[in-house]
Image (cartoon, grey):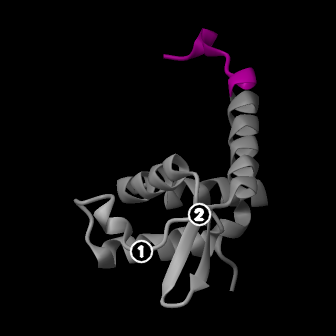
Amino acid sequence: MYAKIDNFTAEQQVLSQFAKLISHPARIAIIQLLAEKKTCISGDISKEIPHLNRVTVSQHLQELKSFGLIKGEIEGVKVCYCLDNEKFIEFQNLFNLFFKQTIAKIDCTDCC
């Protein structure tokens, strides 16, 4: 079966998937916390972000991990989470190129 998403380039699809992934403020908060700590966080991240419960944090961590933005290593009964710096640089480069190419093409002389 042919999906409408196939009409878009691989780059467009990746950019959109990344944008969708980070569109939730809880995921932004988790990413910022992991970046701020600059180390693997094991234990209950919901204690660090008190307005999120454990189940919610766990679900968001799974989404971030499945996309490859964070790494998780099992240490006994705990999982240690940290950011994947290389993946963030990859997405930064993709978005920088997207904005650079888009801005270069903007010509608003005839727009509203």
Taking the image as shown, residue 58 lies to the left or right of residue 83, namely left
Q: Marks 2 and 1, Cα distance to the nearest angstrom?
A: 12 Å
Relative height, residue 55 to residue 84 (above, below): below
Query: What is the secondary structure assignment of the residue under circle 2?
Result: strand
Residue 68 x %, y %: 66, 68
Pick whichever, 46 or 9, lies toward us: 46
Pick whichever, 61 or 18, lies toward us: 61
Identify the residue at image location x=72%, y=63%: 7
Q: Which residue is situated farthest in the bottom direction here?
A: 76
Figure quadrant of the N terminus: bottom right
Relative height, residue 106 to residue 53 (above, below): above
Asked whether disc 2 touches disc 1, contact meaning CB atoms under 8 Å apart, the reply is no
Residue identified by numbered label 1: 43
Q: Which residues fall within the magenta stretch?
A: 103-112
Taking the image as shown, residue 91 lies to the left or right of residue 66, namely right
Residue 58 x %, y %: 40, 76
Q: Is residue 106 magenta?
A: yes
Badge nearest the viewer, 2 or 1: 1
Q: Which residue is situated farthest in the top direction here?
A: 109
Identify the residue at image location x=29%, y=65%: 47
Q: Earlier in the sequence, mark 2 or mark 1?
A: 1
Relative height, residue 77 to residue 92 (above, below): below
Q: Which residue is situated farthest in the front direction here?
A: 76
Whether residue 9 is visible here, answered yes or no, is no
Query: What is the secondary structure assignment of the residue under circle 1?
Result: loop
Whether residue 99 is visible here, answered yes or no, is yes
Which corner quadrant of the image does residue 104 belong to? top right
Amino acid type shown at disc 2: Cys
Residue identified by numbered label 2: 82
Identify the residue at image location x=76%, y=51%: 90
Residue 18 x %, y %: 59, 57
Amino acid type shown at disc 1: Gly
